[in-house]
Image (tube, grey):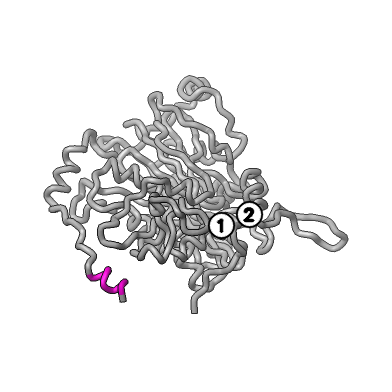
């Protein structure tokens, strides 16, 4: 009864005139936006790879100056349902977690946190369907010269710049290669080991049990322990006005090619042809062992038709001068920092699997209505229906128990399960 009254009393949000928002955007535009050109190629083995290309998104509907682009790859396993669901819902879930009526700079600053909320919300919604498939996700947002990449699983996004430097913008969440993720999974209640065959011999890559998944992060996988989390690694960088090339591809590419070979195989070619050549090179190297999907996205100065080819001579010397020496031997070097000298500036990077750390403590709350908004699912709740992430396992006796991000009861249960604080129970509704 009281909840209904509170809902009726909730004030309508303050509307900002479209002209005001457009004026803000025009005042903040300092340089010409780059041109985005892209190409896609794929070969199917199991038919579980899906991709998303949306080059015409707008932060303010009807205002082309607020445009941004989204490119994503979803590599499904144990079926296609999770990959399709993520393709259809993830973008909207991310955008719904960004405050409305803010300028471009604030929007970009809010994006990493919104990506975390969007990934977790998509996972919760899919698990409520009761289906058992899962999917990796590599999700790329390009706004001007700023590139933001969020990923779970082992699809990968690399950046090839005009200096000939190939940089990894994602972290592979494979248990075999990622020691930190192995430690996190076992600490949260999972077991990590190889398949046992007759005679007690162990074969194959490291897997997580129950479920036998080789990955430590994904969306979906309802039948696997909830220590397999949907919280993405997020990296945000700003390119110089020389531009650069992104290669986003499923593991069918990267199991065959290193990041350097993938970049070198298509330099100097238009994006559409480049994507086909990357797939062709992977096929030539290893054959068609898995679904193989590649997106090539060129971020080009607006007055140029194509990225110029990277000079091959003295490439190693130039790379060391711009970036300093750095090892590319491991795909999981999340500490590999990109230099701001002339090529690219690193704005943000975080890969923690702890939801509290990823949401932060300054999430905006509108308590004037008597309702609090969940930082993950964006549902309005009364205070009795959830907890602040800073509250601990029970209601906090502190004077400000709602300080910080608020989680509804469903999202709080999901958070606790991911951190091994309660038994893993699939979030299935009738």
Can residue 349 be seen in the rendering of this structure?
A: yes
* Front in this rendered view, residue 101 or 22: 101
* Front in this rendered view, residue 340 or 69: 340
What number of labels is visible?
A: 2
Q: Report which residue position mark 2 lands on.
A: 188
Find out whether the residues at labels 1 and 2 contact each other: C-beta distance under 8 Å.
yes
Q: Residue at x 41, y 53 (%)?
A: 401
Stretch in magenta: 2-8
Quarter occupied by the N terminus: bottom left
Of the two numbered discs 1 and 2 on the same chain, state the one appearing first in sequence.
2
Q: Is residue 5 magenta?
A: yes
The x, y position of residue 29, in whole percent, is 21, 37
The x, y position of residue 285, in whole percent, is 62, 46
* Tag 1 secondary structure: helix
Q: Which mark is residue 418?
A: 1
Left or right side of 334 for 346 = left
Q: Residue at x 40, y 44 (%)?
A: 148
* Tag 2 secondary structure: loop
């Amino acid at each position: 009864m009281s909840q209904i009254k509170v809902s009726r009393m909730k004030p309508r949000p303050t509307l900002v005139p479209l002209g005001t928002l457009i004026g803000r955007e025009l005042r903040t535009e300092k340089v010409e936006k780059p041109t985005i050109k892209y190409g896609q190629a794929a070969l199917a083995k199991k038919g579980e790879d899906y991709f998303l290309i949306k080059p015409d998104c707008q932060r303010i509907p009807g205002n082309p100056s607020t445009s941004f682009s989204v490119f994503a790859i979803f590599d499904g396993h144990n079926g296609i349902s999770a990959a399709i669901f993520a393709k259809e819902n993830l973008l909207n879930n991310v955008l719904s977690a960004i405050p409305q009526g803010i300028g471009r700079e604030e929007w970009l600053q809010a994006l990493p946190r919104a990506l975390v909320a969007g990934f977790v919300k998509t996972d919760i919604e899919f698990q409520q369907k009761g289906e058992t498939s899962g999917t990796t996700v590599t999700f790329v947002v390009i706004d001007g010269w700023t590139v933001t990449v969020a990923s779970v699983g082992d699809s990968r996004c690399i950046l090839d710049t005009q200096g000939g430097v190939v940089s990894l913008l994602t972290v592979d969440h494979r248990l075999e290669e990622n020691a930190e993720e192995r430690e996190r999974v076992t600490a949260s209640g999972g077991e990590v080991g190889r398949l046992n065959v007759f005679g007690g011999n162990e074969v194959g890559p490291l897997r997580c049990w129950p479920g036998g998944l080789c990955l430590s992060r994904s969306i979906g996988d309802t039948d696997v322990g909830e220590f397999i989390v949907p919280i993405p690694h997020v990296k945000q960088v700003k390119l110089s006005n020389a531009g650069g090339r992104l290669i986003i591809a499923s593991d069918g590419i990267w199991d065959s090619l290193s990041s350097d070979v993938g970049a070198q195989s298509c330099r100097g070619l238009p994006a559409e042809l480049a994507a086909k050549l990357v797939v062709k090179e992977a096929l030539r190297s290893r054959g068609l062992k898995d679904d193989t999907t590649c997106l090539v996205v060129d971020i080009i100065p607006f007055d140029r038709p194509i990225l110029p080819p990277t000079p091959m001579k003295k490439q190693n010397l130039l790379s060391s001068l711009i970036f300093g020496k750095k090892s590319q031997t491991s795909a999981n070097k999340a500490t590999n920092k990109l230099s701001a000298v002339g090529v690219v500036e690193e704005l943000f990077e975080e890969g923690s699997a702890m939801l509290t750390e990823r949401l932060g403590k300054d999430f905006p709350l509108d308590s004037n209505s008597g309702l609090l908004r969940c930082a993950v699912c964006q549902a309005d709740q009364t205070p009795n229906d959830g907890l602040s992430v800073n509250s601990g396992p029970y209601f906090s006796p502190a004077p400000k128990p709602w300080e910080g991000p608020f989680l509804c009861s469903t999202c709080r249960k999901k958070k606790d399960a991911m951190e091994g604080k309660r038994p893993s129970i699939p979030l299935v509704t009738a």
